[in-house]
Amino acid sequence: MTEKRTMIHKSYLKFVNDKKQSLKEKYVKMIFSSMDAISWA
């Protein structure tokens, strides 16, 4: 029972981490593309 809960908790943490990671990547890409737009303007 506890083991199962730990597993679920771990996969949940991994899910949250992945979400944060992809959000960060999107954010970084956005910043870089806007920087490109500014440098090309």
Image (cartoon, grey):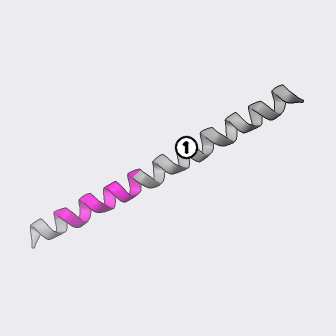
Mark 1: which secondary structure? Answer: helix
Place of residue 9 in the rendered image (x, y in percent of width and height, measured from the top left): 25, 62
Q: Main secondary structure of the magenta part?
A: helix
View extreme (front): residue: 40
Confirm whether the magenta stretch covers residue 12. yes
Residue that badge 1 annotates? 25
View extreme (bottom): residue: 1
In the rendered view, does 25 fall on the left or right side of 37? left
Q: What residue lies at 85% left-to-right and 28% top-to-bottom?
A: 40
**Disc 1 crowd, CA 10 A, few/some/many (<14, 14-19, 20+):** few
Q: Is residue 40 above or below residue 2?
A: above
Q: What residue lies at 17% left-to-right and 62% top-to-bottom?
A: 6
Figure quadrant of the N terminus: bottom left
In the rendered view, does 32 fall on the left or right side of 38? left
Q: What residue lies at 90% left-to-right and 30% top-to-bottom?
A: 41
Q: Quadrant of residue 37?
A: top right
Q: Quadrant of residue 11?
A: bottom left
View extreme (right): residue: 41
In the rendered view, does 2 fall on the left or right side of 14? left
Amino acid type shown at disc 1: Glu
Q: What residue lies at 51% left-to-right and 50% top-to-bottom?
A: 22
Q: Quadrant of residue 39?
A: top right
Confirm whether the magenta stretch covers residue 7. yes
Place of residue 17 in the rendered image (x, y in percent of width and height, measured from the top left): 39, 51
**Which of these two is toward me, 5 or 27?**
27
Place of residue 36 in the rendered image (x, y in percent of width and height, measured from the top left): 77, 31
Q: Is residue 2 above or below residue 37?
A: below
Q: Is residue 33 above or below residue 5?
A: above
In the rendered view, does 16 fall on the left or right side of 30? left
Span of residues in magenta: 6-17
Total numbered labels: 1
